[in-house]
Amino acid sequence: MKRSKKILFQEFIARKGLKSTRQRGTVLESFLSSDNHMSTEDLYLKVREKNPNIGYATVYRTLKLFAEAGIAREIHFGDGQTRYEHVAEGEHHDHLICTRCGAVTEFENETIERLQSEIAGQFGFVVEKHKLELYGICPKCRK
């Protein structure tokens, strides 16, 4: 049975000997309610709408805990800013990143996945994880 990310996070912080606080709960709800690739700043602004007493450092530390717990993944698109995305069990996707506006589009392609496996196999390589990021100009910026 698949457990919710809230439960997974609660179990993680209990194992670490940390407290389940209202602030962490608010940060988690805000993170899970967004499908965007969020920076700490993005999430901080969203969290402040719900609770203006939650500080930037709390959001930053909590995002790090999400990544450590396996419910979020840190991603870097070469612009010097760390973003976070949800981790879904068994799901994999790649990214198209606009070099002008920074828009990120997720995509899945079985042909690309199969080719990557074939190429790795040709070299006797066992892939544990990978990421594919394509950088270019989105349709909106090309207008």
Image (cartoon, grey):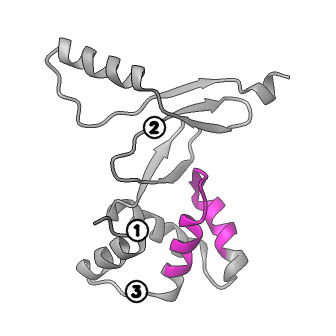
- Per the rendered image, the range of residues in magenta is 25-47
Marks 2 and 1, how far apart at CA: 19 Å
Main SS, magenta region, reads helix
User: 94 above or below 142?
Assistant: below
Element on which disc 2 rests = loop
Q: Nearer the viewer, residue 56 or 20?
A: 20
Between disc 3 and disc 2, whose residue precedes? 3
Q: Nearer the viewer, residue 118 or 66?
A: 118
Of all residues, the one furthest to the top in this rendering is: 122
Between disc 1 and disc 3, whose residue precedes? 1
Which residue matches tag 2?
93
Q: What residue type is labelled 1?
A: Lys
Check residue 5 in the rendering and tell me which mark sits there, or answer none: 1
Marks 3 and 2, how far apart at CA: 31 Å
Name the side, left or right, on which 57 lies relative to 128: right
Element on which disc 1 rests = helix
Evaluate if marks 1 and 3 touch, with contact meaning CB atoms under 8 Å apart: no
Residue 125: x and y in percent read 17, 22
Between disc 2 and disc 1, whose residue precedes? 1
Q: Is residue 78 visible?
A: no
Name the side, left or right, on which 59 lies relative to 128: right
Which residue matches tag 3?
20
Element on which disc 3 rests = loop
